[in-house]
Amino acid sequence: MKPAPLPLPPGDAPLRVVLDTNAVLSLWHYQHPRLVGLLDWLESRRAALLTREATLDELARVLRLPDLGLTADRQARLLVDYRARSEPFAEPDPALREAALALPQCRDGDDQKFLALAWEAEAHLLLTRDKRVLAMATRAPWRDRTLIVTPERLLRHVDLAVATDDSAAGAPSLRPLDASARSILEVTPTAPDAEVVAP
């Protein structure tokens, strides 16, 4: 059974995308051979990967966790690579803080920064593998403004789109990564396929 298409902007319209820490780890740290092709697809959609200091600070904190086993050099290179690929979004205007506080709160307060960023940036996508963030997908105001999905769910959408585009050629697959994308995605030990929650 084919997955239902995601309601994304049509054609090659640019996308505004927020990645939470789990999604960054999936794409930049863990060896997910299928998922790495998403960066190429996002590049083809001229996607802006939006960040803020708070989201980058959390990524830096998680990269230091002993469970990941990353050397200081590897942590620094991953952060540099991700910063180079992402775009900083304006820090919240103090006048808008009340509106941000009025948003429904995620069960894990540490995740709220990603939801607030997605809301304020009018993001098309928030990619996450965190079940607590995914639980917000059907709640207002995000359900009417931002798709909150796993990288795997987005990949199924991409596969469906490519299969449709290439049906005559019989090649339902992602385009190969270009050299720059491959250089960014130096892989380390494989992570579980199940959705995870960052510490």
Image (cartoon, rainbow, N blue to C red):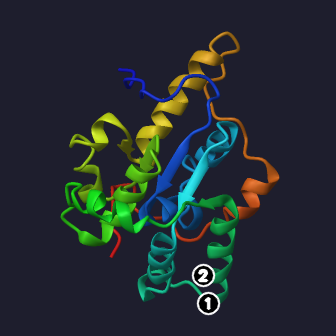
Of all residues shown, which one is farthest toward the top?
A: 168
Quick check: can you spot residue 81?
yes
**Side of 102 where 120 appears, left or right:** right
Measure the alpha-carbon separation of dots 2 and 1: 5 Å
Viewer-proximal residue, 98 or 138? 98
| Residue at (73, 41) in percent of width and height | 176
Asked if residue 191 is positioned above or below residue 43 in the image, the reply reads below
Viewer-proximal residue, 103 or 149? 103
Asked if residue 198 is positioned above or below residue 11 in the image, the reply reads below
Viewer-proximal residue, 141 or 167? 141
Q: Which mark is residue 75?
A: 2
| Residue at (32, 65) in percent of width and height | 97
List x then y, in percent, for residue 126.
Answer: 42, 49
Please state, as top left, top right, bottom left or bottom right, where the N terminus lies in the image.
top left
Viewer-proximal residue, 182 or 97? 97
**Side of 86 where 95 appears, left or right:** left
Name the residue tied to disc 1.
Answer: 72
Residue 49, picture quadrant: bottom right
Amino acid tagged 2: Gln
Q: Secondary structure at mark 2?
A: helix
Of all residues shown, which one is farthest toward the front?
A: 95
Please state, as top left, top right, bottom left or bottom right, where the C terminus lies in the image.
bottom left
Amino acid tagged 1: Ala
List x then y, in percent, for residue 147.
Answer: 38, 40
| Residue at (36, 58) in percent of width and height | 116
Instruction: Verify CB contact (< 8 Å) between mark 2 and mark 1.
Output: yes
**Side of 133 where 15 appears, left or right:** right
Q: Secondary structure at mark 1?
A: helix
List x then y, in percent, for residue 78.
Answer: 63, 73
Of all residues shown, which one is farthest toward the right?
A: 179
